[in-house]
Amino acid sequence: MHDGRSPRRALARLARPGVRIVALALLAQLPACRTSPPTVRLEEPEPVTAASASRATPPEAISDVLSSLERTMQARPAGLAYLLATADAPEPDRSASAEEKGRFYSDRGRAARRLGRFSHALADMTEAARHLAPHTDIDERTTPFFSNLGMAIQRDLAETLAASGNHREALAQYRRTIQSVPPDQRG
């Protein structure tokens, strides 16, 4: 193939007319290909200063993560107090309506999830879902507009499952929730 002629001409003669354009385009890219590894320039490391030392570094242990969360929660004591009070609230009265029980368990489950108490949150969200079906149209206090509290509870249950690491069950819960919506009301 190398008879003193350029490889580009030899390839052009061998290729069919429809393939010549593609072959020429590929050959045009050959000079851009390198056979030797690229040169790596080493720079002097940045000196450690107070500003660079204060950059966030990934936590090394779970205790580092927990202390960071604790510092964050201590910065907002009213929010932490509210979450703790809500998550640790005693069971509702037996005479409470299904709506009241559903709201109570939903609120308590949301607070427990925000505190990282996933087993507690799952139990409460499951109980809330038992009291309020997905199609229960009740004004949800957490939004400024009318919302379906039953659907919100189902969604929160799925989100709690996902947050606790049970993604397969969370996906199944999302599917059950979607299927519970009548076809004429789906968006």
Image: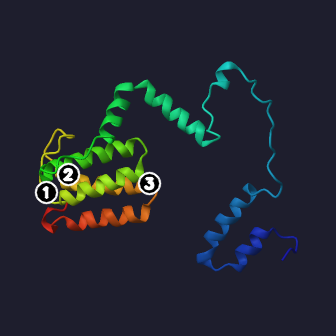
* In the foreground, 150 or 171: 150
Q: Residue 18 vs residue 83: left or right?
A: right
Horizontal arrangement in the rendering, residue 186 relative to residue 5 (left or right)? left
Helix, strand or loop at disc 1? Answer: loop
Residue 23: quadrant of the picture = bottom right
Q: Quadrant of the C terminus?
A: bottom left
SS state under label 3:
loop
Give the residue displayed 41% in from the left and 51% down from the top.
Answer: 118
User: Looking at the rendered structure, which numbered label has been put on residue 136?
Assistant: 1
Mark 1 vs mark 2, foreground winner is 2
Q: Position of residue 138 (x, y in %)?
A: 12, 50
- Are the residues flagged by discs 1 and 2 in contact, CB closer than 8 Å? yes
Which residue is identified by label 2?
Answer: 102
Q: Position of residue 33 (x, y in %)?
A: 75, 58
Callout 2: 10 Å neighbours few (<14), some, many (20+)? many
**Closer-to-camera residue (93/29):** 93
Residue under label 3: 164
